Structures are given as C-alpha cells and as structure tokens.
Amino acid sequence: MLDPWDSASAGWFAAAGLLSEPDRTARLAEVNERVGRRNTDLLERCDGVLAVLDGVDVDSGTAAEIGYARARGKPVVGLRTDLRPGGENPATPVNLQVAHFIFASGGRVCTDVAGAVSLVRELARTAGGD
C-alpha cells in the first residue's frame, strides 16, 4: 500500500513548522512541492486507488487524485461511509464528475471498508497489477 500521508510527509511539515519566518514559509513551499511530487509519483506507481469520499463534499485533493488516476488508466474505488447526501441528485453518491471518473475507471462507490479494499485489490489485479 502506498500512502502519500505517511510519517515521512508529516515529519517534513513538522520540521518546517519549527523554523522562524521567513525561513518557515520558504521551507513549507519546498515541502509542498516535495509532497505534491511524491504523491504524483505514488499515483504513477500504484495499481489502483482507494479514495475516501466522506464529508459534505469530496476533498479537493482527493478529487484531483481521482481524476489523475483515471486519466492514467488506474482503477478507482470510492469509500463513502458518510450517510449525508453528497451528490447533485439521488442518482449520484458524490459529486457527479468525481463519480463519473470512478465509474469510468471500472470502480464503484462502496459503503464499507472491507468491500472497498477487496474491490480495489481485485481491479488492480485484473488491470495488470499484483
């Protein structure tokens, strides 16, 4: 499993936060670039994406990752355990464009963790991953 927010990323932000201005802002800009580049590299290497879709609206970073993964031909599975409506109408569980990318990748939106994990593994295997 590849996680863009593992302890290394957290450590980079924590170390930058200890600095005084203007060094802190300059270092944070470097960390932002490093984390963004690392996340892109992880998306390139992955066999599939499991995206957490909880909240009133899908997190903008998660939405970007979903779109990027779909454009790169990666299967995407959404996990939505939030009971609140999240789409524009009853036919879509989340933002319709986000849902489109998930469905077009061969994935779907699941409501339980085990089912979502199982599906992303299955799709990754059939897409040529391990």
Image (tube, helix red, strand yellow):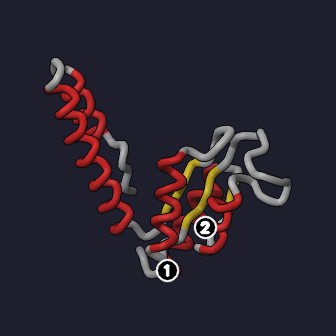
Along the horizontal axis of the image, is 93 left or right of 78? Answer: right
Which quadrant: the N terminus? bottom left
Along the horizontal axis of the image, is 92 left or right of 9? Answer: right
Q: Position of residue 30 (x, y in %)?
A: 20, 42
Farthest residue to the right: give it: 90
Q: Position of residue 84 (x, y in %)?
A: 77, 39
Vertically, is 10 above or below 130?
above
Label 1: which residue?
127
Q: Amino acid at mark 1?
A: Ala
Q: Position of residue 32 (x, y in %)?
A: 28, 42
Along the horizontal axis of the image, is 93 left or right of 13? Answer: right
Which quadrant: the C terminus? bottom left
User: How far separated are the C-alphas under marks 1 and 2?
Assistant: 16 Å
Farthest residue to the front: give it: 22
Label 2: which residue?
101
Q: Nearer the viewer, mark 1 or mark 2?
A: 2
**How many residues crowd around disc 2 within 10 Å: few (fewer than 14), some, or many (20 or more)?**
many
Residue at the (57%, 48%) spot, across then down: 52
> How many numbered circles does the render carry?
2
Q: Nearer the viewer, residue 45 or 64?
A: 64
Q: Amino acid at mark 2?
A: Phe
**How many residues crowd around disc 1 within 10 Å: few (fewer than 14), some, or many (20 or more)?**
some
Q: Position of residue 86 (x, y in %)?
A: 73, 46
- SS for dot 2: helix
Residue at the (32%, 51%) spot, across then down: 36
Residue at the (37%, 55%) spot, across then down: 2
Q: Nearer the viewer, residue 112 or 53?
A: 53
Quarter occupied by residue 128: bottom left
> Disc 1 or 2, which lies upstream in sequence?
2
- SS for dot 1: loop
